[in-house]
Amino acid sequence: MSNLSFYVHIPYCVKRCGYCDFNTYTPAELREGGTLETVSQGFVDSLIAEVTFASRTTSTTIPTIFFGGGTPSLMPAHELGRVIELLKQRWEFAANIEITMECNPDTLTLQSLEQYRSIGINRISMGMQSANQSVLQVLDRTHNPENVAKSVENARKAGFDNVSLDLIYGTPGETLEQWEASVKTALSYSVDHLSAYALIVEDGTKLSAKIKRGEINKPDDDLMAQMYLSVDNLASSAGLNWYELSNWGRPAAHNMVYWQNQNWWGLGPGAHSHIDGTRWWNVKHPSKYQEKLAAFESPMQDREVLGESEKRDEKIMLQIRLREGLAKDELTETQLRILENYPEQIMSVDNRLILTPQGRLIADRIVRELI
Ligand SMILES: C[S@@+](CC[C@H](N)C(=O)[O-])C[C@H]1O[C@@H](n2cnc3c(N)ncnc32)[C@H](O)[C@@H]1O
Ligand code: SF4
């Protein structure tokens, strides 16, 4: 093994959005009367302690680092900088290393962006979700839509030439027109990359409770399909071509590490890792995570080793999502015959099978038939 990417999980948010079930906590959830400063004290020391475990791998080069969350932009730059510095001491950074930070547009200023740029972060991914105030309200999202424009402008001023926005479609009550207006607004900021995710109603979230109580309707599948096709059209007309089911524009090198099943180490509570067919994940709660590392113990919760057939299935599941599609000679006769049933959804280009926009809408169904 030589390349090893890093995911770094920052498990804090100022407020939990109504739809989100990520492994993230508000300071008050972690400690009564807690502030971000008090609850995150010593957290970066734990990340640094976990790097010691990663140092035992035989990897030599880091192609990508991704600070995800939660809201990494709540952490001061000098704290994230300590992690980057340590990784740089222990491994070689690829010449074109991509270092991404996920941000909530409300937590960014020109000054903080300049500081993040100065510690080596060179890609910013911002959660925009929608440009429509009423949609943001249903999502129970704190940010003001105008902060997105300001933050993209500040990111450019601070020297970021790789900026991405996340959007969500299918929020209850959202119309096709409102969705298209949000996509056009996002594209008007001339970003390098756009992600558009279908809203998933996760059990246990406030959104799911409201739907169960009948206060709002479940997202409509047909409308979601129209929304997907419209973002695909609008993004490609603006020069951002699809390269993965939910992503358009300049490919995110870190995400390609996941989709091409390469090796990465996830630092932080609940983070997942994958090295050469072995996967593992850390204990989920930040306090437990910090306790383990303070005692010089591995924070790993559990692990699994993939068998040959699982590896083959996973490859299909991941590669079908990509613009390069599936290599025909890696599929069995039976799998090829199944795909022949989808002439409108699959196209054949140079010995590869690639989803058409119609095919992308039912990618999950096709995968279920294949594996
Ligand atoms: C960790 S967040 C991004 C950074 C920051 N925490 C923020 O929200 O602004 C990652 C992205 O996951 C997406 N996401 C989270 N929960 C989702 C859900 N239930 N359905 C669809 N997308 C979701 C959102 O688009 C969000 O921007
Ligand atoms: S969507 Fe982002 S800001 Fe909202 S709770 Fe989830 S991680 Fe936090």
Image (cartoon, rainbow, N blue to C red):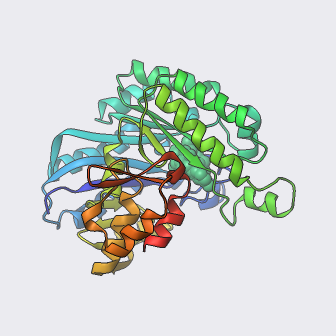
Q: Give above or below for 68 relative to 282.
A: above
Is residue 318 found left or right of 84 in the rendered image? right
Circle count: 0
Q: Quadrant of the N terminus?
A: bottom left
Q: Nearer the viewer, residue 353 or 104?
A: 353
The quadrant in which residue 212 appears is: bottom right
Task: Kindly identify the residue that appears in the image at 69 percent across and 66 percent down.
Answer: 204
Q: Nearer the viewer, residue 174 or 284?
A: 174
Is residue 209 found left or right of 304 in the rendered image? right
Task: Kindly identify the residue that appears in the image at 73 percent across and 52 percent down.
Answer: 220
Q: Quadrant of the C terminus?
A: bottom left
Give percent across and percent down for residue 200.
63, 57
Q: Nearer the viewer, residue 165 or 260?
A: 260
Task: Kindly identify the residue that appears in the image at 63 percent across and 24 percent down.
Answer: 146
Q: Give above or below for 365 relative to 217.
A: below
Give percent across and percent down for residue 222.
70, 51
Q: Is residue 13 visible?
A: no
Give percent across and percent down for residue 366.
49, 64
Is residue 156 found left or right of 135 in the rendered image? left
Q: Is residue 353 visible?
A: yes
Q: Give above or below for 279 relative to 34.
A: below
Give percent across and percent down for residue 71.
51, 46
